[in-house]
């Protein structure tokens, strides 16, 4: 029965993440890039400066940096470590190339999302900020499109509860802990007819308790925790990945050539059955979107809470999330995996990246595995926190701010974190991909419908700051 369910999930994943959706996401980013005159190149320096510089006189619940860290807490997760590995294992090194292409154009999409989040947000009498795709759909496109806003909110809550927010993250954490503490599976307990290591069960309990303690505090506590943990974990992972790359500099040109060549010729995986350019594109773009969330509509939920009065300014800050997440962190993960040749070893999930770290770092295998485990735990933990915030905001919109509904969702979320380790890796990632696609469609429709607002707001802002 379980095998049939997994087969159906895999089939549905391939359907929703087919060529049509890939083209829609890419074409949206390409269109915005052209209309905004390659804003990614021209204003990246300004965006990085705004990222850490407070704006005076803005209205909101958290600083722009706090909002970005909340968004990054949701994006920098297992997608950067496990997602990149699974994409390259399935589609070959060329998947990394398509991940980068999607990220480059996705920066324009992310900018548009951040801009619209501030442009159409609402602030109630208690100072509570309400914003995100559901509000720029309803307030920007009109009340007759409220059904589309509800659709986005429904799938957004689903992504948090059953996709990016819970199963994939805690599954990655428990797998990393088990691989480190009990790689041979010597100490196991049978649950649901399957054997799980004691390390998996203990890790699951600890993560669940920690998540519960933080998310009960709401956006301010999540923002505070993220503002400390996100920069720390990103720098830590960057340093260790950089060590692998710097100690293998002579091999870098060959690795890059392999990535580019494989992007257009495919790789002879599984006897050639999966080694096609289409698979490389599909896996690379799907995992790239999973990681940086450009086009999904998640980041603008956090961006809406930023203390700012300039939509375009927050759009620039939001855009840096894709740059940091994919063009920096995912690229380093991918290069480490290609350099080590770990992608074609038959390993799965986090084991691929663990193998790359063990081969690439000038430390013992135990130290390398421990480093990766710590990074993955931090990455995944903050993603769980960020997506709880997103999911609750979506449910607030769906339920007209019914606090009982939000409380029930919060406890269901904690329960999903608890059961996540007991699901198979393949099923977990396929479910996440499916919800990502269903969430992205309403958001992409809204971005296209409001394209003139995006362009005019941008033109006005950049004209003002240049005079």
Image (tube, rainbow, N blue to C red):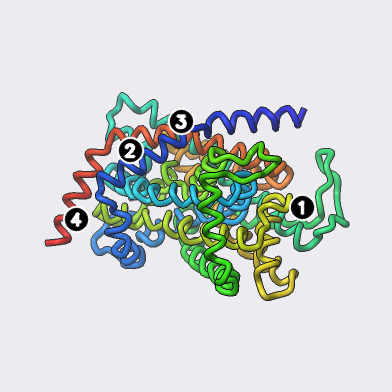
- What whole-number distance in Å separates the C-alpha atoms at marks 2 and 1? 43 Å
Q: Give the residue drawn at x 43%, y 33%.
A: 441
Quarter location, residue 248: bottom right
Q: Which residue is mark 1?
A: 201
Q: Earlier in the sequence, mark 3 or mark 1?
A: 3
Visible residue check, residue 277: yes
Mark 2 crowdedness (10 Å alpha carbons): few <14, some 14-19, many ≥20: many
Instruction: Return the mark for residue 56.
Output: none
Nearer to us: label 4 or label 3? 3
- What whole-number distance in Å separates the C-alpha atoms at marks 4 and 2? 20 Å
Q: Earlier in the sequence, mark 4 or mark 2?
A: 2
225 w.r.t. 280: above or below: below
Numbered disc 4: secondary structure: helix
- What whole-number distance in Å separates the C-alpha atoms at marks 1 and 4? 53 Å
Instruction: Return the mark for residue 20.
Output: 3
212 w.r.t. 246: above or below: above
Image quadrant containing the C terminus? bottom left
Numbered disc 3: secondary structure: helix
Numbered disc 2: secondary structure: helix
Q: Give the residue drawn at x 54%, y 62%.
A: 332
Visible residue check, residue 290: no
- What whole-number distance in Å separates the C-alpha atoms at marks 3 and 2? 17 Å
Q: Are marks 3 and 2 in contact (CB under 8 Å)?
A: no
Nearer to us: label 2 or label 1? 2
Q: Which residue is mark 2?
A: 447
Q: Give the residue drawn at x 45%, y 53%.
A: 71
Q: Which residue is mark 4?
A: 462
């Amino acid at each position: 029965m379980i095998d049939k369910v997994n087969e159906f999930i895999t089939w549905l994943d391939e359907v929703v993440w087919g060529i049509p959706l890939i083209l829609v996401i890419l074409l949206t980013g390409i269109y915005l890039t052209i209309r905004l005159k390659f804003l990614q190149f021209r204003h990246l320096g300004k965006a990085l400066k705004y990222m850490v510089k407070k704006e005076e006189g803005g209205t909101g619940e958290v600083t722009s940096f706090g909002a970005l860290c909340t968004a990054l807490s949701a994006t920098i997760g297992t997608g950067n470590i496990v997602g990149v590995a699974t994409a390259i294992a399935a589609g070959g090194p060329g998947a990394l190339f398509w991940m980068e292409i999607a990220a480059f154009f996705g920066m324009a999409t992310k900018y548009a999302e951040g801009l619209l989040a501030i442009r159409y947000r609402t602030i109630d009498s208690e100072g509570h900020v309400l914003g995100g795709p559901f509000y720029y759909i309803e307030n920007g496109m009109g009340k007759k499109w409220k059904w589309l806003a509800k659709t986005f909110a429904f799938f957004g809550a689903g992504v948090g509860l059953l996709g990016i927010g819970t199963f994939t993250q805690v599954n990655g954490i428990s797998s990393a802990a088990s691989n480190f503490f009990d790689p041979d599976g010597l100490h196991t307990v049978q649950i649901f007819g399957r054997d799980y290591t004691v390390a998996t069960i203990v890790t699951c309990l600890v993560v669940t308790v920690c998540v519960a303690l933080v998310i009960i505090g709401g956006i301010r506590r999540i923002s505070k925790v993220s503002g400390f943990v996100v920069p720390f974990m990103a720098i830590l992972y960057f340093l260790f990945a950089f060590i692998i790359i710097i100690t293998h500099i002579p091999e870098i040109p060959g690795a890059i050539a392999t990535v580019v060549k494989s992007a257009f010729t495919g790789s002879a995986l599984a006897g050639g059955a999966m080694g096609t350019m289409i698979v490389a594109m599909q896996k690379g773009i799907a995992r790239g979107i999973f990681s940086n969330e450009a086009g999904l509509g998640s980041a603008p939920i956090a961006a809406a809470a930023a203390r700012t009065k300039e939509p375009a300014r927050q759009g620039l800050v939001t855009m840096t999330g894709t740059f940091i997440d994919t063009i920096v962190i995912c690229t380093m993960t991918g290069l480490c995996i290609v350099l080590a040749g770990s992608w074609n070893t038959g390993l799965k999930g986090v084991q691929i990246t663990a193998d790359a770290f063990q081969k690439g770092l000038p430390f013992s295998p135990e130290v390398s595995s421990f480093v990766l485990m710590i990074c993955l735990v931090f990455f995944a933990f903050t993603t769980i926190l960020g997506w709880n915030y997103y999911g609750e905001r979506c449910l607030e919109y769906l339920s007209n701010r019914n606090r009982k509904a939000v409380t029930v969702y919060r406890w269901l979320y904690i329960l999903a974190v608890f059961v996540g380790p007991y699901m198979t890796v393949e099923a977990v990632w396929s479910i996440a991909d499916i919800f990502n696609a269903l969430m992205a469609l309403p958001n992409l429709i809204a971005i296209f419908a409001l394209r003139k607002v995006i362009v005019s707001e941008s033109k006005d802002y950049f004209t003002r700051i240049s005079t």
